Amino acid sequence: MRRAGTWLHEVEPLLRGPLSPLLIFVPLGLVISHAAPGTSPLLVFCLNGLAIVPLSNVISKAVEAICEHLGDQWGGCVNATAGNLVDMVIAIAALTGGLNDIVLDSMIGALITNLLLVLGISILLGGLRHRSIQISRQNTLLNSNLLLAVMLVVLVPSALHHGMIFKTSMHHFQFSVVMSFALLAFYLLSYAYQFFTHKSLFALRTKQLLEETQLRHPPGLAPSLLVLLITTIILIFNSEALVEGLSAAATQLQLSPFFTGVFLLPVFGSASEFHISIRAALQKRADLAIATTVGSSIQVMLFVLPALVIIGWLTGHHLMIFFSPQAMVCVIAAIFCIKWVTEDNNFNWFEGIFLLLIYLLLVTSSFFLA
């Protein structure tokens, strides 16, 4: 009984917070989606979307606690892997449901949302509190190189697809699988670069990031892992209901698939990034805000997307890497904006306004697409 009481005492900080009241939507969303088949799909989507917000917050807290116990290097790896856990779970639910277009659009949506909306709000609020916020030069250089790789991942296979270069769809799928293994290897090598061969360049940054996310009284490793596992399992069910409701609601409201996948779905998946990035910017911790938003966007395209292609290959749900012309435009616009904002290694509130303006332009133009 004492052991159980100790675990409950350690788990309680992970569940407590300003978003905790929203946990009521977790069972409510599941009940409405499964026990009331005639319910409006828009209501199902909204309820399960609200359920994902507090679940994302619990996951982010559990990951922070795990990072503290595993140390600098392994903690950073876990943080990178779990940072996009919500997006991956939602995408897997869409993939197994045969909604491949939504999977690809949600990847672009996660990138656009993090780079423009989340970072834009964070820079705006942080810039209003502080005149300027400095970021590390090494951080900017690495992210610039990785964002260039992200842009090529989006443009090259998409250009080949739209130019009808592939002989058959099976050749395209085989190309996607080979490319996915190469991207995963490249992504893992980026960690070898940061944590082993050039460790001295990033040691201080990694230490600072982990110190900035520390809890005053971190829960134990085992309780944190248990909370992460249970929350992820619950998240899977809410994500499936969210995707089903979204698909039906988009058809009912005559929304374009691109607008639905890029600008509606990722808002809920980025809840944890919103929380961490805004808090970091207000505390003048630009590197943490960058790691949460830009780093998360890089993970989506270099880790989550190829992982989904491989999962689809193993499960028989083939996913080919290519993006629509409007998605290509959005990615190019977002990456060039981030390049402009970060090139002087500091942020101010006007740059936050600029990112939000570009996001608004992309949202507005996408809403009127066929």
Image (tube, grey):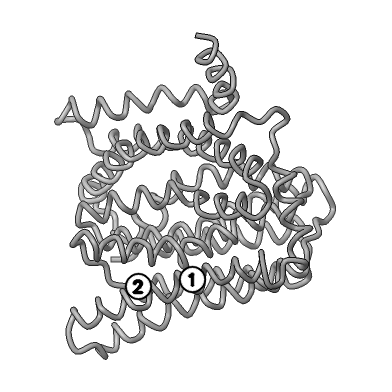
Report x, y in % for residue 252: 21, 46
Report x, y in % for residue 73: 65, 55
Say left or right for 197 vs 19: right
User: Is residue 50 at least partly visible in the picture?
Assistant: no
Residue type at mark 2 is Phe
Callout 1: SS: helix
Residue that numbered label 2 is attached to: 323
Report x, y in % for residue 324: 34, 73
Instruction: Name the residue located 32 percent from the left edge and 24 percent from the top edge.
Output: 28
Asked if 259 appears above or below 213 in the picture, the reply is below
Asked if 7 appears above or below 116 in the picture, the reply is above
Instruction: Name the residue located 54 percent from the left edge and 20 percent from the top edge.
Output: 7
For residue 44, which quarter of the picture? top left
Instruction: Name the residue located 82 percent from the left edge and 56 percent from the top edge.
Output: 132
* Residue at the far right in the pictured view: 131
Callout 2: SS: loop
Q: Residues within 10 Å of mark 2 (few under 14, many from 20)?
A: many
Residue type at mark 1 is Val
Say left or right for 344 vs 339: right
Q: Are marks 1 and 2 in contact (CB under 8 Å)?
A: yes
For residue 39, which quarter of the picture? top left
Residue nearer the viewer, 324 or 214: 214
Residue nearer the viewer, 67 or 90: 67
Residue nearer the viewer, 145 or 122: 145
Residue that numbered label 1 is attached to: 331
Q: Quadrant of the C terminus?
A: bottom left
